[in-house]
Amino acid sequence: MGLLSVPLASALQRALPIGILALAMVGAPVLIFEPQGLPRMQTLDRELARVQAENIELRRDIATLRVEVRQLRDEPAAVEKIARNQLGLVRKNEIVFQFGKAR
């Protein structure tokens, strides 16, 4: 004869699946609604969406800067435009006229 008697083994075979099912029915909602469960997942989803949107914006900025770098490297007119507009530089043979603001 085995370690368990036949009626006890039969009862255990019936009770074990029911016990596991009951544990799952109680444990699953607890795990879902605890602070590290569903609320944490929703927070992480929002954070992921924000970071993805920021990445898209940064990729656009990088593309714009690459175009600007290419222009500065390959087009002398682009360098001259920045020198004139941002730095206020003029050529040696140019005369600058400055006018006061009208009142």
Image (cartoon, rainbow, N blue to C red):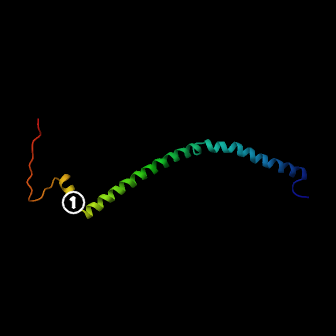
What residue sits 87% from the left and 50% below the top? 10
Amino acid type at mark 1: Ala
Q: Is residue 100 above or below residue 89?
A: above
Q: In which quadrant is the N terminus drawn?
A: bottom right
59 on left or right of 72: right
Q: Position of residue 40 (x, y in %)?
A: 55, 45
Q: Position of residue 53 (x, y in %)?
A: 44, 49
Q: Position of residue 67 (x, y in %)?
A: 32, 59
Q: Quadrant of residue 93?
A: bottom left
Comparing 101 with 10, the one in front is 101
Comparing 37 with 51, the one in front is 51
Q: Is residue 79 above or below residue 37?
A: below
Identify the residue position indicated by label 1 in the image: 77
Q: In which quadrant is the C terminus drawn?
A: top left
What residue sits 9% from the left and 51% below the top? 96
Q: As drawn, which residue projects farthest toward the top?
A: 103
54 on left or right of 102: right
What residue sits 38% from the left and 53% below the top? 60
42 on left or right of 5: left
